[in-house]
Image (cartoon, rainbow, N blue to C red):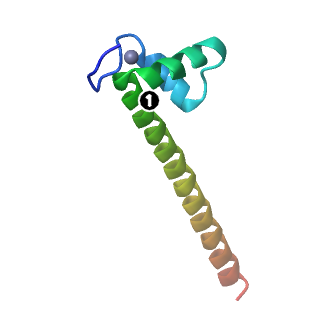
Amino acid sequence: MNNSIEPCKGLENILQRAADGSLKGFMKVFALFHAGRCKGCGTYLERMELTIKALREGREHSENEEALARLKAKVQELAKSSD
Ligand SMILES: [Zn+2]
């Protein structure tokens, strides 16, 4: 346990996997339990969750925008060729 804003040594990977949801079973329970009691790991986990959430939302958003732009271009193309 520590009071810095850095996670405990060797726990970064486990905390990242806890944040992205790929950590299961006992290790997840351990990671969440530890993060709840350790300021450094708790802060790190929170930051990772926010980062992953932002990345996922950003990616979905840009994919949707891209798909929409392609669809619009296709529609315009079809409209032009039918003239
Ligand atoms: Zn810790």
Q: Residue at x 39, y 10 (%)?
A: 10
Q: Residue at x 57, y 67 (%)?
A: 69
Residue lying farthest to the left in this orientation: 4
Under mark 1, the amino acid is: Leu
Q: Is residue 35 left or right of residue 7?
A: right
Q: Residue at x 69, y 82 (%)?
A: 79
Q: Which quadrant of the structure image shows residue 3?
A: top left
Q: How many marks?
A: 1
Image x and y of residue 65, in percent: 55, 62
Quadrant of the image containing the N terminus: top left
Q: Which quadrant of the structure image shows residue 20?
A: top right
Say above or below: 53 vs 28: below
Q: Is residue 37 left or right of residue 2?
A: right
Q: Nearer the viewer, residue 47 or 56?
A: 47
The quarter of the rendering in which ligand 1 is drawn is: top left
Badge 1 is on which residue?
A: 45
Image x and y of residue 31, in percent: 51, 18
Does mark 1's beta carbon lie closer than 8 Å to ligand 1?
no
Residue lying farthest to the right in this orientation: 82
